[in-house]
Image (cartoon, rainbow, N blue to C red):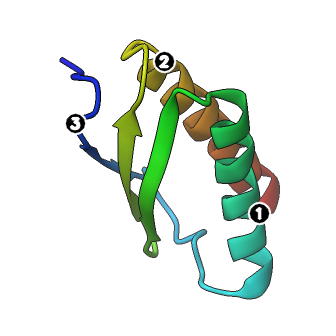
Amino acid sequence: MFIQQYPLFVTNRLAQGLPFVPNEFINNLIFGILARAANLYPGVTICGALFLGNHYHLVILPESDPSEVASFMNFFDGELAKMVKRIL
């Protein structure tokens, strides 16, 4: 259940590997994908993001249509998976 103007705490984990090695290159890729997702889905506001070795945490706020959260997450996770696959 998604409620408008109520922050959502999202955690997602990779099945294997440690692709989120903190360096400038990886950070630019990750936050580039996150910025593109925010641009494509303006109804979702990103309040915070934390990427660790094999998982990440997001704090997002659905602004208008709560169903847009699913589209936002599908896009972000899909693009992130493609990036990880290319790197590995």
Which residue corresponds to the image point at 72% horizontal and 73% vertical from the top-left?
Answer: 26
Which residue corresponds to the image point at 25% horizontal and 43% vertical from the top-left?
Answer: 7
Secondary element at tag 3: loop
First in sequence, mark 1 or 2: give its number. 1
Label number found at residue 38: none
Is residue 35 depicted above or below 40 in this figure? below
- Whether residue 22 is visible, yes or no, is yes
Q: CA distance from mark 2 to mark 3?
A: 14 Å
Location of residue 78 by image quarter: top right
**Front residue of 87 and 36:** 36
Residue 43 in the figure: left or right of residue 60: right
| Label 2 environment density (alpha carbons within 10 Å; few <14, some 14–19, many ≥20) | some
Q: Nearer the viewer, mark 2 or mark 3?
A: 3
Residue that badge 2 annotates: 68
First in sequence, mark 2 or 3: give its number. 3
First in sequence, mark 3 or 1: give its number. 3
Residue that badge 3 annotates: 6
Quadrant into which the N terminus falls: top left
Q: CA distance from mark 3 to mark 1?
A: 28 Å
Is residue 66 depicted above or below 46 in this figure? above
Residue type at numbered disc 3: Tyr
| Coordinates of residue 45 in the picture (x, y in percent) | 48, 42
